[in-house]
Image (spheres, grey):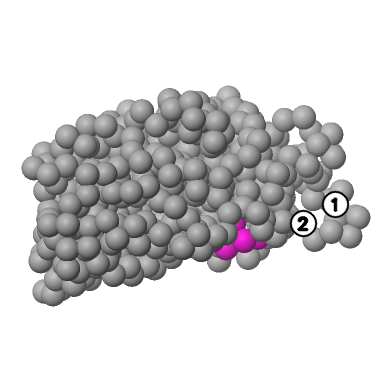
């Protein structure tokens, strides 16, 4: 699928220079109360949240202490897990990855009595992943999906009219453009992605695997762990083969911000990353502003393009001493007004259904109309099904993929991953520790 973009919102302004929407039907009933929020760590996301908090404080009199979460999803999980299991009630509202509601449900307030009506306005797939055992444990905040970013200018200069549809095409284009540019003295790589051993690598590897027909982590057709599969192994081998040829060896230390920085400074032709990084690429200070195209991720010849579904939610701690104030904050941040504003300012994809068809928003953020055709190609990690064991399950997966990327035999490692993952699922949930 080809996605053409003209412009997008987002530039590096300070929280004070931004004008977030007022709090709808604001009340000062909880004025003077102080809550703590574990929020976004992405640079632009943090600025937007600081600005939203200023507006919320002004309209409600509630004070919000913002603590940015660790940058890595996996580190954030470990931090929250520790906090939830500790006795103190220090944090009221948590920014929660869409793969965590099943694991953290016991520690989160049921929002059904307060936000069920609002929740109905959100995309069913997001609402469903936030509902655990009939309890609405979080509210959808933004949607994310894996995308292929490419340098329109370089593709054109090297005679390519369209971005690649297959991995074979991506490899050929990456090799060609990389060697052409290097012979002109430029330091350039073909394709960068998130190769660090953490949840981001699980997302990348799952896209490689499924786009080679290798099933999901748990194959939806058979319900079985599907890693020791010849097509999955072929996909892992292919990715290992990119390293040192079209992908820099340093990719095994790249997370989302690191790969974004490399791409933004002009270091690569193609990048796999999430939708929310788009605003940073088109910001006023971006060296490649106006030169970036976005497309669905390639697939192996004969297979379909897939994108891992990502996204973040807001949950209220069951131990919060100020649940009403915390819910008021969540209601504001997840409102259609705030979601539209965050989409314009930061390319955060909305979860409020009607915003996807809003002509004004579609024209301000062409990314929206552009990624809409890719939504049916989204695939989910099996976090709902695996429940509290998901983090350990994913750790076996990304650690195995890491070993393959570092040169170990793919077939042998895939067999080991499969064995460990199957064994993990056979254990009672209460005995699970991250490996
Ligand atoms: C993005 C996605 C999230 C995913 C994470 C992996 O933040 O939104 O769902 O788990 O990346 O690093």
Q: Residue at horizontal 91%, vertical 55%?
A: 184
Q: For mark 1, what is the residue? A: 181
Q: Which residue lies furthest to the right in this view?
A: 184
- Toward the viewer: 115 or 411? 115
Above or below 123: residue 256:
below
Magenta residues span: 257-262
Above or below 24: residue 244:
below
Q: Is residue 198 left or right of residue 260?
A: left
Can residue 244 be seen by looking at this rendering? no
Residue 258 included in the magenta stretch of the image: yes
Look at the numbered disc 1 and give the secondary structure of its residue.
helix
User: What separation in Å lies between label 2 and label 1 (alpha carbons)?
Assistant: 7 Å
x and y percentages locating residue 343 in the rendered image: 46, 43
x and y percentages locating residue 36 in the rendered image: 24, 67
Q: In which quarter of the image is the N terminus?
A: top right
For the residues labelled 2 and 1, say whether their Cβ atoms are less than 8 Å apart.
Answer: yes
Q: Examine the residues drawn in magenta and state their main secondary structure.
A: helix
Q: For mark 2, what is the residue? A: 188
Q: Residue at horizontal 56%, vertical 34%?
A: 366
Above or below 35: residue 270:
above
Q: Residues within 10 Å of mark 1 (few under 14, many from 20)?
A: some
């Amino acid at each position: 699928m080809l996605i053409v973009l003209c412009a997008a919102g987002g530039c590096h302004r300070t929280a004070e220079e931004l004008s977030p929407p007022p709090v709808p039907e604001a009340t000062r009933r909880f004025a003077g109360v102080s809550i703590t929020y574990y929020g976004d760590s992405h640079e632009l996301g943090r600025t937007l949240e600081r600005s939203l908090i200023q507006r919320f404080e002004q309209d409600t009199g509630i004070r919000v202490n913002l603590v940015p979460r660790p940058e890595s999803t996996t580190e954030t999980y470990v931090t929250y897990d520790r906090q939830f299991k500790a006795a103190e009630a220090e944090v009221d509202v948590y920014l929660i990855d869409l793969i965590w509601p099943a694991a953290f449900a016991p520690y989160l307030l049921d929002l059904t009595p307060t936000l069920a009506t609002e929740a109905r306005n959100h995309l069913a797939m997001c609402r469903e992943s936030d509902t655990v055992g009939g309890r609405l444990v979080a509210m959808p905040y933004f949607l994310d999906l894996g995308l292929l970013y490419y340098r329109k200018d370089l593709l054109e200069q090297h005679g390519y009219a369209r971005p690649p549809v297959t991995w074979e095409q991506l490899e050929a284009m990456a090799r060609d453009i990389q060697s052409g540019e290097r012979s002109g003295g430029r330091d350039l790589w073909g394709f960068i992605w998130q190769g660090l051993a953490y949840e981001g690598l699980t997302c990348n590897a799952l896209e490689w695997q499924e786009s080679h027909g290798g099933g999901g982590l748990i194959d939806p057709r058979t319900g079985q762990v599907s890693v020791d599969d010849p097509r999955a192994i072929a996909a892992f081998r292919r990715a290992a083969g990119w390293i040192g040829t079209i992908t820099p060896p340093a990719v095994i230390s790249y997370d989302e911000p690191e790969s974004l920085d490399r791409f933004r400074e002009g270091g690569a032709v193609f990048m796999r990353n999430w939708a929310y990084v788009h605003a940073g690429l088109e910001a006023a200070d971006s060296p490649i502003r106006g030169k970036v195209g976005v497309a669905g991720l390639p697939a192996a010849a004969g297979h379909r393009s897939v994108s891992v579904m990502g996204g973040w939610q807001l949950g209220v701690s069951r131990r919060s001493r100020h649940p009403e104030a915390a819910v008021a904050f969540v209601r504001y941040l997840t409102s259609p007004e705030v979601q539209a504003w965050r989409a314009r300012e930061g390319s955060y994809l909305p979860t409020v259904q009607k915003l996807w068809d809003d002509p004004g928003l579609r024209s301000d953020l062409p990314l929206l109309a552009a990624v809409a055709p890719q939504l049916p190609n989204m695939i989910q990690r099996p976090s709902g099904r695996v429940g509290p064991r998901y983090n350990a399950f994913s750790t076996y997966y990304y650690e195995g993929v890491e070993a393959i990327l570092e040169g170990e035999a793919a077939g042998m490692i895939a067999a080991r991953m499969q064995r460990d993952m199957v064994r993990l699922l056979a254990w009672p949930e209460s005995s699970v520790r991250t490996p």
